Image: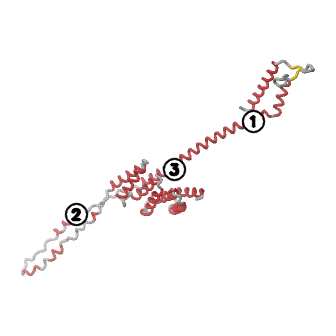
Amino acid sequence: MRVCDHVLVAFLALGAGGALAQNLPPVVGPGGAPTASPVVGKPTTVEGRLARIERLLDSGTLIEMATRLDQLQNDVQKLRGEVELHGRDLDVIKQRQRDLYLDIDRRLRRAEVGNAAPPVVAAPPVAPAASAPTTPPATPPPAAPAAPPPVAVAPAPPPATVTPVAPVPPAAPTAPAVDPAKQQLAYQAAFDLLKEGRYPESITAFEQFLASYPGGAYADNAQYWLGEARYVTRDFSGSARDFQLVLKQYSGSPKVPDAMLKLGYAKYELQEWAAARSVLTELRQKYPSSTAARLAASRLERMAQEGR
């Protein structure tokens, strides 16, 4: 309701009061002059009512009250809108915070799909074991000189030494060659469990993979994702050990920057502030242009704001 509406209501109220006063019999004073109605308490003449309305308008009280009411209504509407905006912003922030970790994992998985699939190295060809015995028969038998005296038996020792028994070392095949296809299937099965959110099963699968293929082509990735699975289940101590193993045993792996980042996160969750700050700072120094370094800088700023 605007100011003009309030003024109109005031006019109508005053007019209704005047009409009521006209319907009442006038009160005659002692001298015979009409006086104000004792019921309404307002002037009964048109001039009196107009004079009273003019006084109200001149005083500005009605207009000021209407103006204040309008301002209060506007303020309430603005506050209501701001509350709704803040509520939506809070929901967005919460959703972004929940999705942040999953978004990082998705990007890391995409990078891993491009980098982690190593070329399938064919198993070294097994040296044919039957090739060794074929060489000895190639040595021609020593020409026995149809010799004069039987004393010529002395040349017999050379053929005994020539017999090549040495080529027997096919000991190399004792280390069984790892089937790359089988190894890749085992790794992919564990990784699929992680993507499906079946974290306990993925932890078991990655542990079995590392036990079966400790030096395999996917060992560094398996060790890293084992730490990720434990981090998601809030086993921060276990995840910190896994990420440290990545840094210690696979120092040349492309997963090292990510392992350093998640190690800093795990130390942060364990409230080991100095260790977290040290790892994240080292990450920024060693890999300044990596995505992990940018995330480390963001976490360091957060720690600074928190006074950690």
Task: Say which of marks 3 and 2 sits in front.
Answer: 3
Question: Mark 3 near mark 1, Cβ–Cβ under 8 Å?
Answer: no
Q: In the rendered image of this protein, does residue 116 appear above or below residue 131?
A: above
Q: Sort mark 1 into few (<14), some (14-19) or many (20+) by Cα contacts within 10 Å.
A: some
Amino acid marked by disc 3: Leu
- Please provide percent x and percent y for residue 220: 41, 59
Amino acid marked by disc 1: Thr
Question: Mark 2 near mark 1, Cβ–Cβ under 8 Å?
Answer: no
The structure residue drawn at horizontal position 51% and vertical position 48%, both measured from the top left corner, is: 99
Q: Earlier in the sequence, mark 3 or mark 2?
A: 3
| Cα–Cα gap, marks 3 and 2 | 57 Å
| Cα–Cα gap, marks 3 and 1 | 49 Å
The structure residue drawn at horizontal position 39% and vertical position 58%, both measured from the top left corner, is: 219
Considering every residue shown, the one lying at the far right of the view is 31
As helix, strand or loop, the secondary structure at mark 1 comes to helix
Residue named by callout 2 = 129
Residue named by callout 1 = 67
Q: Sort mark 2 into few (<14), some (14-19) or many (20+) by Cα contacts within 10 Å.
A: few
Residue named by callout 3 = 100
Q: Quadrant of the C terminus?
A: bottom right
Q: Earlier in the sequence, mark 3 or mark 1?
A: 1
Q: In the rendered image of this protein, does residue 27 appear above or below residue 224?
A: above
The answer to which quarter of the image holds residue 11 is: top right
The answer to which quarter of the image holds residue 88 is: top right
Judge from the rendering whether residue 242 lies leftward or rightward of residue 18; answer left or right.
left
